[in-house]
């Protein structure tokens, strides 16, 4: 069951953690923005955060690949998220995989204060391994939504972010010039 904005206003639910995860180009940020805009329509007080290291589209705004945007605060460490306004009811966090390992504790602290926390991020890196704090967030979340892209090789649902450029770095900021979504068979080269 999805938690409704109306029930949050009435205090029917305490705080919660929602995680939106998947590969690159799967619509994670798009879904985060959609949920946050619905909370705004419900006249809930929202605050949005992203890692300061992610400057691909904008220095502070959260921006989807489809160019939908919502104002946010860029922070260097997850603990800065705890400095939000006292009347905040909903917190959005984008690109969770780039945050430090304390992000699950920060989200738990917010949820324990009655705040709805909506987090979006990659669940796997370009090697297909669990990425950053997202797997830990998935374990403690009330709701996990895993979204898929479309495999550029075969058209099946894609859950992997295939890196097209050579780099030994685990983190390589990039877009379509650097990554493409692939299904399991195309990612591992076992497809026909």
Image (cartoon, rainbow, N blue to C red):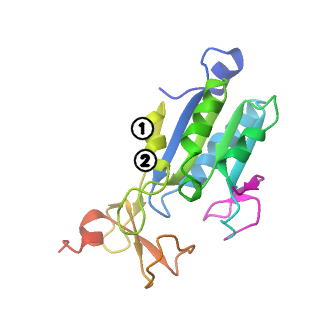
Using residue 96 as the reference point, say whether residue 140 is left or right of it: left
Query: Which mark, by number, is residue 43?
Result: none
Q: Which residue is drawn at 47% across and 34% down?
A: 143
Q: Residue at x 51, y 70 (%)?
A: 171
Q: Is residue 121 above or below residue 189?
A: above
Say whether marks 2 and 1 touch (CB < 8 Å): yes
Q: Does the magenta stretch include residue 96?
A: no
Q: How far apart are marks 2 and 1 (CA)?
A: 6 Å
Q: Is residue 73 magenta?
A: yes
Which residue position is annotated with label 1?
139
- Total marks shown come to 2
Crowding at dot 2, Cα within 10 Å, few <14 / some 14-19 / many 20+, comes out as some
| Residue ranking furthest to the bottom | 166
Using residue 70 as the reference point, say whether residue 126 is left or right of it: left
Residue numbers of the magenta segment: 56-76
Q: Position of residue 150 (x, y in %)?
A: 40, 64
Secondary structure of residue under mark 1? helix
Q: Where is residue 181 in the image (x, y as percent from the top left)?
A: 41, 68
Q: Is residue 81 above or below residue 75?
A: above
Crowding at dot 1, Cα within 10 Å, few <14 / some 14-19 / many 20+, comes out as few
Query: Which mark, by number, is residue 135?
Result: 2
Q: Residue at x 67, y 64 (%)?
A: 67
Using residue 156 as the reference point, say whether residue 68 is left or right of it: right
Q: In this view, does 15 lie above or below 39?
A: above
The quadrant where residue 167 appears: bottom left
Q: Where is residue 27 in the image (x, y as percent from the top left)?
A: 53, 56
Q: Position of residue 113 (x, y in %)?
A: 67, 24
Secondary structure of residue under mark 2? helix
Q: Residue at x 60, y 18 (%)?
A: 13
State the residue in front, 169 or 166.
169
Q: Is the magenta stretch mostly helix, strand or loop?
A: loop
């Amino acid at each position: 069951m999805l938690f409704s904005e109306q029930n949050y206003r009435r205090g029917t639910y305490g705080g919660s953690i929602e995680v939106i995860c998947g590969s690159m180009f799967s619509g994670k940020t798009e879904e985060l923005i959609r949920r946050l805009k619905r909370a705004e329509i419900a006249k809930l007080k929202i605050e949005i955060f992203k890692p300061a290291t992610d400057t691909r589209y904008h220095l502070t705004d959260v921006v989807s690949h489809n160019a939908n945007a919502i104002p946010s605060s860029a922070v260097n460490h997850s603990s800065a998220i705890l400095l939000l306004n006292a009347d905040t009811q909903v917190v959005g966090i984008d690109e969770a995989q780039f945050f430090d390992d304390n992000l699950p504790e920060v989200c738990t602290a917010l949820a324990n204060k009655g705040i709805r926390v909506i987090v979006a991020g990659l669940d796997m890196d370009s090697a297909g391994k669990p990425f950053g704090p997202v797997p830990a967030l998935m374990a403690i979340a009330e709701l996990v939504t895993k979204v898929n892209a479309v495999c550029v090789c075969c058209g099946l649902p894609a859950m992997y972010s295939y890196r097209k450029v050579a780099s030994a770095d685990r983190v390589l900021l990039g877009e379509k010039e650097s990554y493409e979504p692939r299904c399991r068979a195309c990612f591992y080269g076992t497809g026909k």
